[in-house]
Image (spheres, helix red, strand yellow):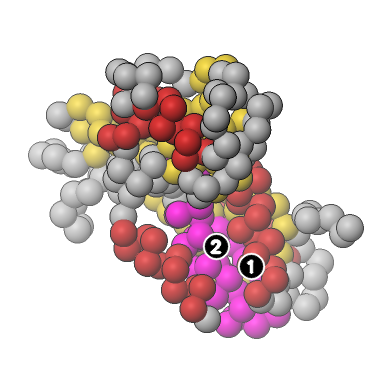
Amino acid sequence: MKLLYFASLREALGVAAEDLALPVGVATVGALRDHIIARGEPWAALARTKNLRCAINQVMVGVDATVSDGDEVAFFPPVTGG
Amino acid sequence: MKPLFTAMFSVSVQAADFDVGAETAMLTAGDAAAGAVVSFIGLVRADVPMGQKVGGSGTAGVTAMTLEHYPGMTEQALAEIVAQARNRWQLLGARVIHRVGRLLPGERIVLVAVASSHRHDAFAACEFIMDYLKTRAPFWKKEETAGGGRWVDARESDDNAAARWMMD
């Protein structure tokens, strides 16, 4: 799967995108987030991002949404456009 | 399936500025049923006291702003918001333009223009699109100030503004 990070989270990670094989036992985007955070710094920045949002294949979803290998999964802080 | 967008319903994400007069004229061109156009234009605010001139001496506020977005998702999210507005009100056209990149105080950021036969639908749909855009379209603002850069925090009032449409 492809992971994308935006805005302050991208800056904190120093990474905008990465490829990751769907980790064993990870079924939801919330579990994927926890898996990434468990890699330690700088990935714990996901845990420090208040009201972290996620999108699967460019549609905003809740933490219970199902992820599959091949998905594009994005993590970002709450949006501030307009 | 009918197409989501005709020429009268469109969204754009672009670095370039836009011409408000030309955009609103195009929205209703040749449509005799159009009786109302409501447009909202969002500007880069310097966050200085009211009445102070942009770029005036002693400005302690924002000197520039950079808009980041999620290419692909942004256009899709804006199109979905416009589609929801079309489901709720009788609209003849809608145009959403959101700029990205580095902008200076006073510059236009966003245009939402809605055409309808009567003003009520146009007013309501324009406000709905802006409220939803604020909380659902993947844009992020980073402000530049004399003290350095800072990401703009999301406002709870924006979430509340979007939520009130769900109670209708």
In the shown orientation, is residue A24 left or right of residue B161?
right
Q: Position of residue B35 (x, y in %)?
A: 68, 79
Task: Inspect the magenta stretch and tell me whether residue B123 lies in it.
Answer: yes
Q: Position of residue B75 (x, y in %)?
A: 63, 43
Q: Badge 2: few (under 14), some or many (20 or more) residues near its Cα, within 10 Å?
A: many
- Judging from the image, what secondary structure is the residue with disc 1 in? helix
Q: Which residue is mark 2?
A: B129
Instruction: Give the dominant element type of the magenta stretch: helix, strand or loop.
Output: helix
Magenta part of the protein: which range?
Answer: B112-140
The chain holding disc 1 is B
Residue B33's place in the image compared with A53, above or below, is below
Q: Which residue is drawn at the image coordinates 78% and 56% (left, top)?
A: B4
**Nearest the eye: A37 or B149:** A37
Residue B111's place in the image compared with A9, above or below, is below
Task: Inspect the magenta stretch and tell me whether residue B124 lies in it.
Answer: yes
Which amino acid type is shown beneath numbered disc 1?
Ala
Q: Position of residue A7 (x, y in %)?
A: 40, 31
